[in-house]
Each structure stands twice: as C-alpha cells, then as structure tokens.
Amino acid sequence: MNQKTALITGATAGIGYETANLLAQNKYNLILTGRRKERLESLKTKLELTFGCKILLLTFDIRSRKATETALSSIPEEWRAIDVLINNAGLAAGLGPVNSADVDDWENMIDTNIKGLLYTIRTITPWMVERQSGHVVNISSIAGKESYPNGSVYCGSKHAVAAISKAMRIELMPFGIKVSSIAPGAVDTEFSLVRFRGDQEKATQVYKGFTPLQAKDIAETILFVITRPPHVNIDDLLIMPTSQASARDFHRK
Ligand code: NDP
Ligand code: 8X3
C-alpha cells in the first residue's frame, strides 16, 4: 500500500487527469472523481497496472449537493485519511456580455466552480481537522486575479475560489492544514472545447500562434506544492505561458 492518499476532483480530462498520472507515479493512492465513468475506469486500470497504486472511483455531478455529499460520504473508513484534496473540477461555459449571456451558463459555472468546490471542502476538511493534518489545493485561474470582458461570471467564480482559499487558510491554520491556491494562465486541455460547446475550430483559435501551458505543467506544479516540507506552504501560485503576460495579453506569431 502506498503511503499517501490524494483526492482529485475532475480527473477524467486535462489537469486532473495528468495530476492523477503524476501522483500515481509518485506513489500516491488516489480517489478520483468526475462524471465520465468509462474514462475514470480506464484511468484506474492503467494506473493500477503501471504504478501498483490503489484507486477509488466516485462518479457524480459536483453541481448536485446531494450527489456530492452522498458520494463523498460513501468513502470507506480506510480511505478517509486524505492527505491532499485537489479541488480541480471546473469549467467555463460560453463567452458573452452580461446583457446577453446565457443565464444557464452562469448557473453551470457557479454551481460547479464555487458550490461544488464548497460541498467537497465541507465534507472532506472535517476528516483533516480530526487528524490535524492535510493539504487542500484549490485550482483558481488568472481569471481569479483579473477580469476580462465576456467572462464576468467565470472570472467571478475564480475570484471566489481565491477568496475562499484565503479565508480557509486562516480557518484551518490552527489544525496544521495547508491551503494552496494555484492560478494557471492558458492551458491546452478540453477547457475551450467545453466553453465553446464542442466547437473545435473556436477552441483551436484560443491557443493559436503561441505555446500554451500543458496539463502536465500544472501537474508538476501541484506535485511541487504538495511536496514542500511541513513548515512550508505555497499560499498562492500564478503560472503563465511565457507568451501570455496577463489575462488578455498574448504574444501570437
Ligand atoms: P477539462 O475540461 O480538460 O477538465 C475539467 C474536469 O472537470 C473534467 O475532469 C470534468 O469531468 C470535471 N468536471 C467539470 N464539470 C463537472 C461536474 N459538473 N461534475 C463533476 N466533474 C466535473 O479542463 P481543465 O483541466 O483545463 O480544467 C481543470 C480546472 O482548471 C478547472 O477548474 C478550470 O477552471 C481550471 N483552469 C483551467 C485553465 C485552462 O486554460 N485550461 C486555466 C486556469 C484554470 P467530467 O466532464 O467527466 O465530469
Ligand atoms: C482559464 C484561463 O484565461 O481562459 O481559467 O479564463 S482563461
């Protein structure tokens, strides 16, 4: 049995998927979540065979408080010593101004990026408090530091993740629990494909003419953050592509 356990939300794609691979390689046992069951199952098979780690899968929609609480509460006792919680599941839905954007998209982003993250934190952190140990890593964004036009609610949701992380750090500090916030710039994942509802052409344009971050870059950053010595916490880490200097400034060839 490997020694440490990490729970990663949104492990079926992108940053969560690559983080699962890297942590398995680094001898973590993993609790992996997402809605796409087949992807989770094939990832579990691959990681168990390749790295000999133990994997527990939980398939649920994080927007549903009931589904999230039910799934997380079903985690068996022997898995509850969670050393690292990586709140990664999230999305942007659409891109449009407040006067005409789709309100369903707003609900989707708020329910996933803010409420789903909170339901997860509310269920898992009491176990960390009991053990007086643990590390929560919240995936924010450059959009949690700057707002850009047509992204008000996505940016708002990521600003909320940053604000929640700051308060959590103070609340959980007396229990020896670390809280880190990681804010990436553009990462080439399924993110833009989801944002543009499967429009591959629009998604490709987002990363055109410059080299974006790869999900592996963020996985390596997460591994760095969670392997610092006990007296060191990385509070807030902004990681950008070299050709992106702000939420809106790209150097495209
Ligand atoms: P992907 O679309 O590649 O992956 C998103 C993951 O989140 C998937 O595993 C998906 O699983 C899961 N997820 C989304 N909605 C739900 C839901 N309702 N219930 C359960 N799981 C859900 O995107 P990324 O890897 O890029 O995104 C990961 C995080 O990184 C997000 O929080 C995003 O906001 C953030 N981020 C991304 C950046 C980028 O440029 N890509 C930059 C900065 C931050 P499934 O669909 O199977 O449920
Ligand atoms: C994702 C990065 O700039 O598309 O969080 O919002 S951005």
Image (cartoon, rainbow, N blue to C red):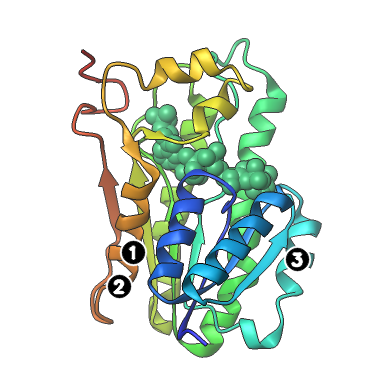
Residue sitting nearer the eye, 172 or 198:
198
Residue at 42% of width from left, 46% of height from top? 140
Label 3: how many residues lie within 10 Å, few (<14), some (14-19) or many (20+)? some
Label 2: how many residues lie within 10 Å, few (<14), some (14-19) or many (20+)? few
Label 1: how many residues lie within 10 Å, few (<14), some (14-19) or many (20+)? some
Residue at 62% of width from left, 39% of height from top? 110
Task: Assess whether mark 3 and mark 1 are in contact (beta carbons under 8 angstroms).
Answer: no
Label 2 sits on residue: 227
The C terminus sits in image quarter: top left
Amino acid beneath label 2 = Thr
Residue sitting nearer the eye, 167 or 81:
81
**Measured Cα–Cα span from mark 1 to mark 3:** 26 Å
Label 1 sits on residue: 223
Left or right side of 81 for 212: left
Let me know if residue 158 appears in the view. no
Amino acid beneath label 3 = Ala
